[in-house]
Image (cartoon, rainbow, N blue to C red):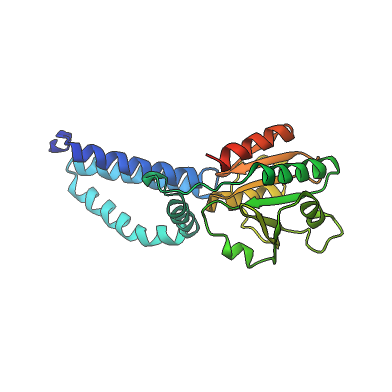
C-alpha cells in the first residue's frame, strides 16, 4: 500500500521535471481567468492520487473516469494557454542552454534610447519591439515593411501622431527597422495595473509568447517602460534604459 514511499533517483528526477512543467504553466497563466480553473484541476488530481493510495476503489474509479474525459475538455478550455506554453518552451531553449543571444551594438542602442528620450519629453506614444531569437514573421506580416537602418529621427518620425504608420508597433532587429504599424497580441491577464493602457497590454502579450523585449512610451505621461517575459519595469531615465538594453542584448 505504501510502496510509493520507496523513492529512487529516477523518481526524484520525475518529480522535479513535473514540478518544472507545472511552474512554467503556472507562470504563463498567472493573473489570467484560467488560473482558478488550473488550481481547481490540480487539487482534484491531488485528491484522486490520495484516494488511489488509500485504495478506495469505487471513488477512485469514478474520479479516474471524470479526469480521463476531462482531458479533452482541458484542451478546449486551455487551448490559448497550451499554445502559449508550447511557443514559450520552443522559443526559449533555456533548459538546454541553446538559446541564442542577440547582439546589438552600443551605437544602435544609443539611437533607440535617444529616440525614446525625445518621445518621452514630447509625450509621443511609442511601442517598440526588439527581436531576440523568436520568429516575429507573423507579426511583421500585419504591418508595413520598412527594412531601414535604425536611426533616432526615423523612429521618432514613425511614431509622430500625424504619420500614417504611428499606430501599432515598430519591429527592430540587431541593426534594422523591419516593419511598422504592426499588430501585437493582447494579454488577457487580470493582474496588470489599471494605469497601463493598450500599448502596455500589447507589449506584455508579445513578451509572453516570444522572447522579444519591448519599450513603451506612454502618450499620457511620457513614462518609459521596459517589458520582458510579461513583466513591466518602469524606467527612470535614459541611462537606465541604455544599461538594461546593453545587459540584455550583449550577454
Q: Is residue 141 above or below residue 56?
A: below
Q: Position of residue 236 (x, y in %)?
A: 72, 31
* Side (left or right) of 71 relative to 148: left
Q: Is residue 188 visible?
A: no
Q: Nearer the viewer, residue 35 or 47?
A: 35
- Is 213 situated left or right of 72 in this image? right
Instruction: State the image coordinates of residue 180 (x, y, percent, origin top left).
Output: 71, 61
- Rendering coords of residue 7 (x, y %): 17, 35
Residue situated in front as seen by the camera: 196 or 146: 146
Task: Answer with left or right where residue 191 lies relative to residue 217.
Answer: left
Q: Could you say where residue 172 lies in the image, as x and y percent from the top left?
A: 65, 54
Which quarter of the figure has residue 160?
bottom right
Residue closer to the observer: 21 or 164: 164
Residue at 80% across, 46% down = 219
Image point (81%, 64%), residue name: 164
Number of callouts? 0
Q: Is residue 68 left or right of residue 92?
A: left
The quadrant the N terminus occupies is top left
Instruction: Depth check: give the residue in front, 10 or 124.
Output: 124
User: Does the rendering let one see residue 157?
Assistant: yes
Which residue does the image show at 53% across and 53% down from the upper left?
209
Q: Quadrant of residue 178?
A: bottom right
Amino acid at each position: 500500500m505504501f510502496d510509493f514511499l520507496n523513492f529512487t533517483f529516477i523518481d526524484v528526477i520525475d518529480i522535479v521535471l513535473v514540478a518544472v512543467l507545472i511552474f512554467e504553466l503556472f507562470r504563463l497563466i498567472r493573473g489570467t481567468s484560467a488560473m482558478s480553473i488550473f488550481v481547481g484541476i490540480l487539487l482534484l488530481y491531488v485528491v484522486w492520487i490520495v484516494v488511489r493510495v488509500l485504495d478506495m476503489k469505487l471513488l477512485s474509479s469514478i474520479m479516474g473516469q471524470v479526469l480521463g474525459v476531462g482531458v479533452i475538455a482541458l484542451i478546449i478550455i486551455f487551448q490559448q494557454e497550451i499554445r502559449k506554453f508550447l511557443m514559450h518552451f520552443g522559443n526559449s531553449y533555456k533548459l538546454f542552454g541553446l538559446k541564442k543571444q542577440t547582439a546589438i551594438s552600443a551605437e544602435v542602442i544609443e539611437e533607440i534610447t535617444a529616440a525614446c528620450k525625445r518621445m518621452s519629453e514630447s509625450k509621443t506614444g511609442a511601442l517598440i519591439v526588439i527581436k531576440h531569437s523568436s520568429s516575429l514573421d507573423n507579426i511583421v506580416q500585419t504591418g508595413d515593411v520598412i527594412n531601414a537602418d535604425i536611426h533616432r529621427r526615423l523612429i521618432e518620425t514613425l511614431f509622430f501622431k500625424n504619420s500614417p504608420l504611428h499606430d501599432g508597433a515598430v519591429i527592430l532587429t540587431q541593426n534594422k527597422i523591419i516593419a511598422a504599424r504592426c499588430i501585437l497580441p493582447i494579454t488577457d491577464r487580470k493582474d496588470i495595473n489599471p494605469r497601463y493602457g493598450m500599448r502596455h497590454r500589447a507589449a506584455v502579450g508579445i513578451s509572453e509568447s516570444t522572447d522579444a523585449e519591448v519599450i513603451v512610451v506612454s502618450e499620457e505621461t511620457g513614462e518609459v517602460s521596459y517589458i520582458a517575459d510579461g513583466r513591466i519595469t518602469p524606467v527612470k531615465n535614459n541611462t537606465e534604459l541604455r544599461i538594461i538594453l546593453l545587459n540584455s542584448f550583449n550577454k
